[in-house]
Image (tube, helix red, strand yellow):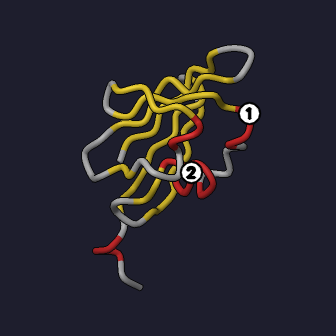
Amino acid sequence: MELQNQVMIDIIRSPNIKKSVNIKPGATVREILAEANIEVATYESVMVDGVKVPETDFDKTRVETGKFISHLALKDKLLHQSLRM
């Protein structure tokens, strides 16, 4: 098992629910959301380290260690959820 090639992501869906998944460093936004069992098609954008990333760029945007994914915007409302690389 190559843990040195993975980072931990903490997914906070609410103040009381926390989920962790392992993912390789440099994974795309789409890969991270899929690994966390988050339905990507329902989101129009996320924030990666304070920069808005639209759904059209989920496959192009890589998230490095130390970056944050937050403010997952549902196509109809904002979901208060964040991921930390």
* Residue at position x 36%, y 82% in the image: 2
Give the total number of marks visible in the rendering: 2
SS of the residue at dot 2? helix
Name the image quarter holding the N terminus: bottom left
Q: Position of residue 48 (x, y in %)?
A: 38, 34
Q: Position of residue 4 (x, y in %)?
A: 28, 74
Q: Quadrant of residue 40?
A: top right
* Residue at position x 53%, y 45% in the image: 58
Q: Earlier in the sequence, mark 1 or mark 2?
A: 2
Frontmost residue, 5 versus 51: 51
Q: Label 1 vs label 2: CA separation? A: 12 Å
Amino acid type, label 2 = Arg
* Residue at position x 67%, y 44% in the image: 38
| Mark 1 closeness class: few <14, some 14–19, many ≥20 residues within 10 Å | few
Please say if 18 is above or below 6. Answer: above
Q: Residue furthest left?
A: 66
Please say if 60 is above or below 12. Answer: below
Q: Please name the residue that numbered disc 2 is placed on.
A: 30
77 on left or right of 7: right
* Residue at position x 56%, y 45% in the image: 19
Amino acid type, label 1 = Thr
Instruction: Give the label on residue 16, or none.
Output: none
SS of the residue at dot 1? helix
Q: Position of residue 60 (x, y in %)?
A: 45, 51
Q: Quadrant of residue 77?
A: top right
Q: Please name the residue that numbered disc 1 is placed on.
A: 42
Frontmost residue, 57 versus 68: 57
